[in-house]
Image (cartoon, rainbow, N blue to C red):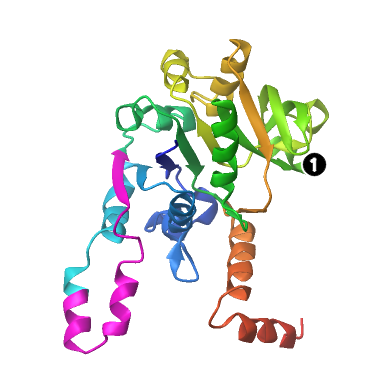
Amino acid sequence: MVKKAVILLGGLGTRFLPITKAVPKEMLPIIDKPIFHYLIDEAYKSGIKEIILVVSSEKKKIIKDYIGQAARLEKILKKRGKNNLLKELQPIPSDISIELCEERNPLGDGHAILQTRNLVGEEAFGVFFADDIIDSEVPALLQLIEVYKKYNASVIALERMPKEKLSLYGVAKTEKIVNRLYKIRGIVEKPMPDEAPSDLAIPGRYVLTPDIFEILEKMEPGSRGEIILADALDLAIKKGKPVYGLEYKGKWLGCGDKLGFLKTTVLFALKHQKFGKEFKEFLKSLKI
């Protein structure tokens, strides 16, 4: 079973300046919830109730405030008789356990994952990158977990990507097993398009086995001075450890830049139960 998930909330958010001078990128709202809350929702729908948030010192307080109690506001709402709003104060299910893991020196996504070793323990765990929301009928992480159950090995999500965009992502060298399932033969981090081993990019969704910690611990920082998860997985493959890839069913919504964030917001607004229909009519009425 996969019982725990790690959500990486690192990064400076420079592509969202100036707002990220004061507000962490992960706290930017899509409708009425911050980006990382959608990842918690996906983990919960995948059967996971233990969440580890890796945060920087600067972000720790605001994220802790969001997931914690709001006693003063709750008291005011009760006094004003706005009991219908009380459930909105605690949108995270009460049976979820959330721990904050502080990363004092950001040295890459692999380094961030390594900080969670004591909290994760000796069991497989899910990993989310904060920029990547996946809109799907069956939660993307749950799709990966089903593969893990069968093969008892690390599993990464795969998404076909236009050639000109491959240099922005890790790209997998694959050997097809069945339909959308692959054995991963190697991973190249941000290759030039002509040097990419395939058109299967890696969005921020993984199920990892605990032996990844030993590899990460022994890795030296790369050319950018960082320890990168893709490099660690590639090394694991070279050491003979099996890693699988699943071309999941769903839509990858990258929220790492302003355009991607806007597209995600519009999509979720159109799907919103209360005002989606009205919003759609508004968009149709625009004379642009």
The quarter of the picture where residue 283 lies is bottom right
Q: Quick check: 264 above or below 164?
A: below
Q: Is residue 6 left or right of residue 144?
A: left
Q: What is the x, y in percent for residue 169?
A: 66, 37
- Classify the position of the N terminus by image quarter: top left
> Mark 1 — residue?
164
Q: Amino acid at mark 1?
A: Glu
The quarter of the picture where residue 179 lies is top right
Specify the farthest residue to the top: 239
In the image, 109 versus 155, the foreground residue is 155
Label 1: state its secondary structure: helix
Q: Is residue 186 magenta?
A: no
Number of numbered discs visible in the structure rendering: 1
Specify the farthest residue to the front: 150
- Look at 72% across and 30% down and name the residue there: 182
Q: What is the x, y in percent for residue 72?
A: 17, 73
Q: Is residue 229 left or right of residue 183?
A: left
Q: Quick check: 11 above or below 235?
A: below
Q: What is the x, y in percent for residue 261?
A: 58, 60
- Look at 55% across and 28% down and name the residue there: 154
Q: What is the x, y in percent for residue 177?
A: 76, 28
Q: Is residue 2 left or right of residue 181?
A: left
In the image, 244 versus 272, the foreground residue is 244
Q: Which residues are magenta?
A: 74-101
Answer few, some or many: residues within 10 Å of disc 1's Cα (few below 14, many 20 plus, some between 14 and 19).
few
- Look at 30% across and 27% down and name the residue there: 118
